[in-house]
Image: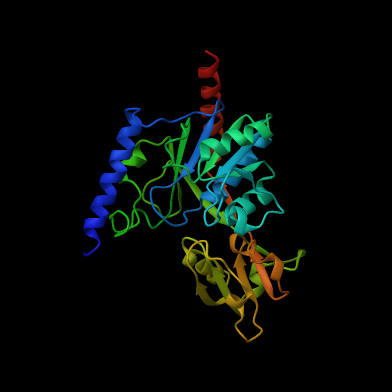
Amino acid sequence: MLLWPLSLAFLVVVLTRRLLYALRLIRSQHPGIPVIVVGNITVGGTGKTPLVIWIAEHLKSKGWSPAIISRGYGAKIDAPRAATLASEASEVGDEPVLLARRSGCPVWVGADRVAAAAALRRAHPEVNVLVLDDGLQHYRMRRDIEIAVMDARGLGNGFFLPAGPLREPGWRLRTVDAVVAHTGAALKDFAMTLAGDEVHRMTDARARRPLKSFAGQKVHAAAGIGDPNRFFLHLGRAGIQVIPHPFRDHHPFSERDLEFGDGLPVLLTEKDAVKLRRVARPEWWVLPVTARLDPGFGAWLLRKLDECRRSKAA
């Protein structure tokens, strides 16, 4: 395999960097309130964003005041800034806009998540817990709870980037506090499923219909997510005749990408739809998905946070 030497070099860099942080030869910082990191050890979408939304909603329902920190992938961000409902995906990233819309809590973005956390806390002193979206490898931010997300693809071919999907060795999963995995994954502490059975019209979110109302119809399905096939299969299980249009993760969609010339409905993921809201068309439909977790996950998370709070008070 031609990429194998590059994969080995990537592994050396990863392990060296982790060792330098462990020996405190590279400085890390803690923001002063509990930090929950949600991430994975592979590239590509595994359902991190729906899980982050679930965690934020759950913590709010239990009296916590959470906020979310994200890298803002795909956007040029010179300094930490807030991502809001009104933000453009090109300015803060697609996932932060979705996180702000769905979670209802403060969302800040920045390549330096330590600086983003500090800016967020100055703007929102009421926040008492941070959730880092895709922050497992961001060792500059010290964390209290690590949650790794896995799907049925597992560790892929077992190679590191660029020859395979791995960001870190498989043993890294034994060092996190919990592995949350989709049905079919080989390793998990808690199971997660992604549910989505209702779509809304892109031009009017009040216009809703069951996903299964498209059963038997041909539709175009476009997805610029880590695993587009998961979206296409979900639609297929609803009896829809899917014409798939996969794009790379975080693809900067424009209306030209969805001009198919036949008048058929177009189904989109919620993450992709935030990039197209200014050019929305009535035949475009959006499928929101929601994470469903093992009943014990929420209680486990609250126990871990209580342990963090007690240890800092001691």
Q: Nearer the viewer, residue 159 or 232?
A: 159
Q: Is residue 142 left or right of residue 82?
A: left
- Does residue 165 appear left or right of residue 138 in this picture? left
For residue 282, what is the image quadrant? bottom right
Residue that extends furthest to the front in the rendered view of this protein = 78
Considering depth in this image, is 20 or 300 the residue closer to the camera? 20
Q: Position of residue 11 (x, y in %)?
A: 27, 48
Give me the residue at 63% from left, 59% from top.
Answer: 288
Q: Position of residue 169 (x, y in %)?
A: 30, 45
- Looking at the image, can residue 92 be seen? yes
Examine the rendered structure and indicate whether residue 121 appears above or below residue 261.
above
Q: Quadrant of the N terminus?
A: bottom left
Q: Position of residue 313 (x, y in %)?
A: 55, 15
Residue ID at (49%, 39%): 37
As drawn, 217 above or below 9: below
In this rendering, would 162 be left or right of 188? Answer: left
Q: Is residue 249 above or below residue 131?
A: below
The residue that appears at 37% across and 46% down in the rendered structure is 187
In the visual, does 19 lie left or right of 144? left
Number of on-image labels:
0
- Residue name at image x 60 percent, y 52 percent: 92
Residue 59 appears in the rendering: no
Q: Position of residue 171 (x, y in %)?
A: 30, 41
Residue sitting farthest toward the bottom: 262
How does the figure colour the protein chain or chains?
rainbow
Nearest the viewer among 238 and 83 is 83
Give the farthest residue toward the top: 314
Residue 214's quadrant in the figure? bottom right
Q: Quadrant of residue 23?
A: top left
